[in-house]
């Protein structure tokens, strides 16, 4: 078959808005993507997940992702635009399949692509001719070509002839009210030129700007680069924050002054550590892959170590603050404000707040927490519930530690009622003697 005519029927379906789209993995990336596609494209959308509970919730119109309103999901389900299933054989109905499964690190801080392998293995026997498969899961350069493609190809399906494979990194930012899937530019890189063309055409149906790159590897590395950029700059400001403590300089004042420069500077802010699925994980994906090329990513790994050390530094600051009041951390009652990895979301993935809380417990502190977005969570096999944020609760604490910086917290009351506050997010502008800014 002429490569230029390969996928011509798929191209027509996409252009006509009649392509059936499947999204594998219905978490923080997959469910918002499913909703974005179904909202803008007329074709039927299938959501695949191994969790029967998630599938039932979606089919009932109930969203478990904060950025997706249940009322919007209900409309799409009732109108027949979205259906969720645990039956992966229904991939045979799909013209386009997008894989959005987790890619965590294993215990040795090495990439774990087992979920990608499982997803590809589940859909591969059912793919129809002229199928487009796109991987969105953040991963190391070469995954789409070296891991995904061999699982999808067969005697009946060949890349560039009747199978098209691409990588397009997810750029979901939970809680961001400005940038969403539709208005955030979408990078696309295929394993062949035709794969890139078809993937770009597909995303162009519901994303305002598509950015094609020459290869899937370039697309894979672009995502890692975006997050490593943030990681190393956050590490820089975290290190400076520790230096500023010793020099008795306010790091937040320094940042505010520096950001007045209208060019050549971008502000980053210190905190108790890095959280979320991507930024704490992505540097290790690249450093692991770099070893295959006999290359040691010293700068990236140093940044990772600095950021990983911030929970311990935060605990040390709290210990020092308690000591100034003649109190020990062992036996102290500590109220933690926020357990999510950033403000105004319910996402706890890789949250540094949990590391701080765990370290405080090991040192004998009695921990209570308040989070308006997390009623309870499980840690070390035990369910922990949020307390009510009252004057009595704040007053009873030997120290309050702000870990997330949620906007819907009464910080005026906290400042007025607390004996001691360690603010890791600079949300307390009133810098009284009992309020310490990280």
Image (cartoon, helix red, strand yellow):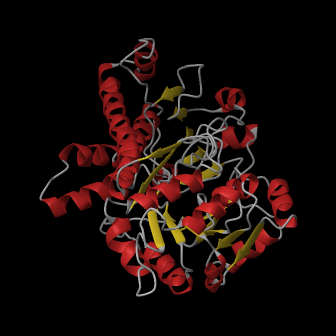
The N terminus, quarter of image: bottom left
Q: Considering only vertical position in the picture, is 370 above or below 41?
A: above
Relative placement, left or right, of 356 versus 411 is left
* Total count of labels: 0
x%, y% of residue 393? 71, 44
Judged from this view, the residue extending furthest toward the left is 294
Q: Quadrant of residue 18?
A: bottom right
Q: Is residue 28 visible?
A: yes
In percent of width and height, residue 139 lies at: 39, 60
Name the residue: 51% across, 49% down: 353
Residue 51 sits above or below residue 375 on the image: below
Q: Nearer the viewer, residue 229 or 183?
A: 183
Which residue is more in the foreground, 117 or 331?
Answer: 117
From the viewer's perspective, tell me whether residue 259 is left or right of residue 370: left
**Residue at x-position 32% and y-position 52%:** 283
Task: Determine the residue positioned at 65% across, 56% down.
Answer: 15
Rendering coords of residue 178 (x, y %): 65, 35
Residue 116 drawn at (x, y percent) = 45, 72
Q: Is residue 354 visible?
A: no
State the residue lying farthest toward the front. Answer: 2
Viewport quadrant of the C terminus: top left
Location of residue 194 with respect to 162 vertically, above or below? above
Q: Residue at x 57, y 80 (%)?
A: 128
């Amino acid at each position: 078959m002429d490569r230029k005519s390969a996928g011509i029927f798929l191209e027509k379906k996409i252009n006509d808005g009649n392509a059936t789209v499947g999204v594998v993995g219905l978490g923080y990336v997959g469910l918002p993507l499913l909703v974005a596609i179904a909202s803008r494209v007329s074709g039927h959308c299938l959501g695949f997940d191994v969790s029967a509970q998630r599938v039932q919730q979606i089919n009932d119109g109930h969203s478990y992702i904060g950025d997706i309103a249940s009322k919007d999901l209900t409309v799409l389900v009732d109108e027949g635009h979205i259906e969720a299933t645990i039956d992966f054989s229904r991939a045979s109905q799909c013209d386009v399949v997008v894989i959005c499964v987790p890619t965590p690190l294993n215990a040795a801080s090495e990439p774990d692509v087992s979920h990608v392998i499982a997803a590809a293995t589940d859909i591969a026997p059912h793919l129809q001719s002229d199928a487009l498969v796109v991987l969105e899961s953040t991963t190391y350069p070469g995954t789409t070509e070296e891991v995904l493609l061999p699982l999808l190809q067969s005697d009946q399906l060949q890349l560039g002839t009747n199978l098209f494979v691409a990588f397009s990194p997810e750029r979901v930012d939970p809680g961001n009210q400005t940038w969403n899937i539709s208005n955030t530019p979408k990078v696309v890189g295929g394993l062949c030129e035709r794969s890139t063309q078809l993937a770009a055409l597909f995303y162009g149906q519901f994303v305002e700007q598509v950015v094609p790159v020459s290869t899937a590897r370039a697309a894979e590395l672009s995502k890692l680069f975006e997050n490593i950029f943030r990681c190393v700059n956050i590490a820089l400001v975290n290190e400076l924050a520790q230096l500023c403590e010793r020099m008795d300089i306010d790091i937040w004042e320094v940042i505010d002054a520096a950001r007045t420069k209208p060019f050549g500077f971008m502000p980053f802010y210190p905190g108790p550590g890095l959280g979320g699925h991507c930024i704490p994980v992505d540097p290790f994906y690249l450093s692991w892959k770099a070893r295959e090329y006999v290359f040691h990513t010293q700068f990236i790994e140093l940044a990772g170590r600095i950021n990983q050390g911030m929970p311990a530094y935060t605990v040390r600051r709290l210990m020092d603050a308690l000591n100034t009041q003649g109190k020990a951390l062992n036996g102290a009652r500590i109220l933690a404000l926020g357990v999510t990895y950033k403000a105004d979301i319910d996402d706890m993935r890789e949250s540094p707040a949990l590391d701080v809380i765990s370290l405080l417990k090991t040192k004998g502190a009695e921990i209570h927490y308040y989070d308006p977005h997390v009623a309870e969570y499980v840690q070390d096999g035990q369910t922990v519930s949020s307390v009510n944020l009252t004057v009595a609760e704040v007053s009873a604490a030997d120290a309050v530690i702000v870990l997330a910086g949620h906007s819907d917290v009464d910080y005026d009351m906290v400042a007025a009622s607390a004996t001691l506050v360690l603010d890791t997010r600079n949300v307390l502008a009133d810098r009284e003697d009992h309020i310490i800014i990280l």
